[in-house]
Amino acid sequence: MQIATTEPNIDQTLSDAAQGDAQAWRVLVERYTPRVLGLLIKQCHDRDLAEEITQATFVKVVSKLGQYDERGRFESWLFRIAMNRLRDEMRRRKRQAVAMDMTPGSARADQDAGGLAGGTFGGTFGGTSGGGGLEQLTHQEQLEQVRCAVETLSESDREIIYLRHTAGLTFAQIADTLEQPLGTVLARGHRALGKLKTLLSSADD
């Protein structure tokens, strides 16, 4: 499946970076680090770990860039590397019984929810039943409602939500990243958003 990139010059930038162009590599890192880091923070609720995995992701990218030849699919490839790295680390930590800080209501969890309440989800679910909606709540209340709603979703549904609304991937790119049929990803995304809308609407009643 060929994915059209959102950056028309990305293939040239990748080619230049693969040939050792430091400026091209700097462009890639500056362009994609915020999105990779944001996705990982929301997936693991641990900024330090997210930063570590982000760095590891770009280390792997630079080591493999000379072999990369899938034009138009860089974002899917990049986010697949990041997510696989995170899964590997989480499995390693679980085996070692290292507890992660995922306490509901913590400052870190609230920070993770902020992008959802204030961004796309705020626009999607604002003005729901009861004449209220997220826009009638304080910022902290928005954070808590969105965070709680997202945490009730299955891990696979949260993955779709964060890839779409945090990483900014298209559904076609998400399908490529997860290596799943586009129809399956669209159905999962629609189902997850429907669940969130119901949960947030109920919270306003």
Image (tube, rainbow, N blue to C red):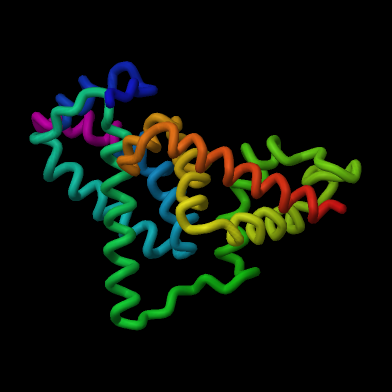
Q: Position of residue 32 (x, y in %)?
A: 36, 38
What's the residue at 65%, 69% (across, down)? 105
Whether residue 37 sits left or right of residue 15 in the image: it is: right
Return the residue nearer the eye: 35 or 132. Answer: 132
Q: Quadrant of residue 190?
A: top right
Question: Magenta residues: mostly which secondary structure?
Answer: helix
Q: Position of residue 126 (x, y in %)?
A: 76, 40
Whether residue 91 sits left or right of residue 19 in the image: it is: right
User: Does the magenta-highlighted stretch encompass residue 194?
Assistant: no
What's the residue at 47%, 45% (across, down)? 160
Using the image, determine if residue 44 lies above or below residue 24. below
Using the image, determine if residue 69 lies above or below residue 163. above
What's the residue at 22%, 30% (across, down)? 23
Which residue sits furthest top? 8
Q: Position of residue 48 (x, y in %)?
A: 40, 64
Q: Which residues are magenta?
A: 18-28
User: Does the magenta-highlighted stretch encompass residue 20?
Assistant: yes
Whether residue 142 sits left or right of residue 69 in the image: it is: right
Q: How many marks?
A: 0
Quarter of the image with the N terminus in it: top left
Using the image, determine if residue 109 lies above or below residue 175. below
Return the residue nearer the eye: 115 or 159. Answer: 159
Q: Position of residue 15 (x, y in %)?
A: 15, 25
